[in-house]
Amino acid sequence: MEDRIMESSSSAFGDMDGDHTKSIIHIDIDCFYAQVEMVRDPELRSVPLGIQQKNIVVTSNYEARKYGVQKCMLVTEALKLCPNLKLVNGEDLHDYRAASNKVFAILQHWKCPVEKLGMDENYIDVTNIVQERLRSVNMDSVSISGNLCEEPSIECPCGCHTRLKVASQVASEVRKKIFDELSFTTCAGIAHNKLLAKLVCPLHKPNDQTTIFPEHAASFMATLPSVRSIPSIGSKTTETLISQKILSVSDLQQASLDVLKKHFSSDMAVRLKNLSLGEDNTPVKQTGKPQSIGLEDSFRTVSVKSEVEEKFSALLQRLLVLVREDGRIPVSLRVTLRKKDAKRLSSHRESRQCQISPSIFTITNGTLTVTEAGQQKLMTIIMRLFNKLINLSKPFHLTLVGLAFTKFQERMTGRSSIVNYLMNDISVQSVLNLQNDCDTSTTSMDYSAVSPSSSTTTDLSDAEVEPSPKKPKKVNWIAKRRCLAKEEVASPSKLKVGELRLNSKELEKVSELRLNSRDRSLTPRASPAKECLSDASDSMKDVAEGGNCEECPSYVDQDVFSALPEEMQQELKTMWKNPSSSSMPRSSQRTNKPKPNTILKYFVPHK
Ligand code: DCP
Ligand code: MG
Ligand code: MG
């Protein structure tokens, strides 16, 4: 135990020494798509209802569940169980997304961090509200609202029972407000960490809530049917654990850390062990705009290039609508394919992404638009990425194509925002989609926590060589840890542009340079290379060879420097060796004569 805590404290996850100070609520909307339809048409409330996407019932209302109609059941199977099942097509996700955003907006009312986990799930960290209320409330009069996982035998000396009781009341209020304003019933889980809050949330479905006290964490975790039931554990991790005869959560609780460390990194081993005990110290991070906006379409099989092109073209049209709604200018595009592997009788996904020029998009009357020529440019890029993924000299069989804009530039409206654009960190996206278990057309909105610099989720699943289609997932823990170590993304580029007058060509050049530098920070190191590279962007590979600049002054960002063309590097080095011969924009060197606007100007020391 001590070993675990010590390891844990020195790990990247921070300490996990039985800190019960937080109060976290996890909220999940009951039969989400079905409720959206029932709110639209109240007559559907009294009938068994299934939401259909292609040949699958993606969810059903609780009336239909009485007949055994489950999420992700084949329509044929569902109709056998419930011949009166009313089916509503749910392939257009627009209204579901809109409802999801409304719920998210309501949750902002409490002015606490809210992290969106999927279309119908959110975490809220109500620690501060609880503290505030406890100042004005008689502690003895506080009672649990809703269900308690297990009655406590003794009071925890830290006062967490009282705090969680107050949190359960806040959860009731949150659920009531969602119901009053949107007519959606919800479930909630209340705990001192995200893991437990999520896991106890569905214990009393629908329209109810459950609280768990910290001392019951380990015993509750042991009741879960398998290690796979832990939200952060994906199929590959599960496979590895099973290979070590670790099947149940209690097996994992009892597994020796040394054994785990033989199969996982030290941090990961500790993390797995802690999760099995119901310990999780990942913070609730306020969700910002989605980190990527994507769409996928799946089908039985497509083996002809022209058909692929049609699919992409249709996806692109829909994607451009979403991007217009979002309002940000995309600067990176990702193409995803799922290839059928006849030999392995399986399918797997592969992605490629590349930067795209922001000039493809224009803002007309405040609306983001793409001209016909711009759309053709995008199609050319898409098909180029496709050609990189598929060897066209051999037959291919695809079962899914996907498109996503994965990086964005905030809108530039005026001179100062150009500076902002260049100075702000552009968040680097991970490769995850919110997607269906079932093979249907999906929209992916990969929501980011506001800061891209650290991991916020408890997602440990399988490094996302292929994002698992099992369940909605957000940012992947391993991918983030491996590819986006804090120090690699947090430091802003040292390009300083305060005094520049840029024409659009140069602006583009600098933005590309900057993005290259960003992407380069993703370049995988040492062993995790495989996981990252399979989804690596072209630019990552293209800039991976950059060298060190021993002659660089300390204020120069080495990543940026090594991403420059060779001749520019030479020019800079010469200039640094012999500053008097340079066109560096030092005030002492300024003359009235206009100087060519060269890249050298961008390298000015940080003040
Ligand atoms: N969804 C989907 N494909 C899946 C799972 C879910 O399209 N494999 C969609 C339909 C659901 C919504 O996401 O309505 C939310 O998923 P949940 O797992 O929360 O399921 P529900 O909200 O439908 O039901 P529950 O009452 O069990 O939460
Ligand atoms: Mg739900
Ligand atoms: Mg859900």
Image (cartoon, helix red, strand yellow):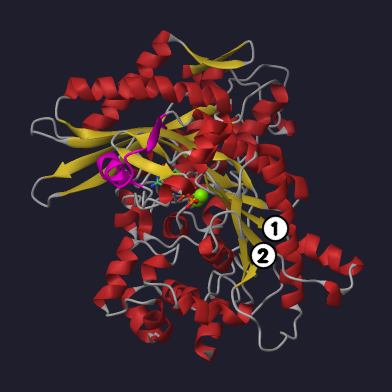
- At label 2, the amino acid type is Gly
User: Which label was assigned to residue 146?
Assistant: 2
Task: Say which quarter of the image contains residue 333.
Answer: top left
Q: In the image, residue 445 lies at what x, y percent?
A: 49, 39
Q: Residue 113: where, in percent of width, then height?
A: 69, 53
Along the line of sight, which residue is nearer the eye, 580 or 558? 558
Q: Is 90 covered by the magenta stretch?
A: yes
Quarter of the rendering occupied by the C terminus:
top right
Give the labeled residue for mark 1.
171
Q: Earlier in the sequence, mark 1 or mark 2?
A: 2
- Mark 2 falls on what kind of element? loop
Q: Which dot marks residue 525?
A: none
Magenta stretch contains residue 108? no
Q: CA distance from mark 1 to mark 2?
A: 9 Å
Q: Residue 565 appears at what percent x and percent y? A: 41, 34
Q: Residue furthest right?
A: 136
Magenta extent: 72-91
| Amino acid found under the numbered disc labelled 1 | Ala
Along the viewing direction, whichever of 116 and 513 lies nearer the viewer: 116
Q: Is residue 574 visible?
A: no
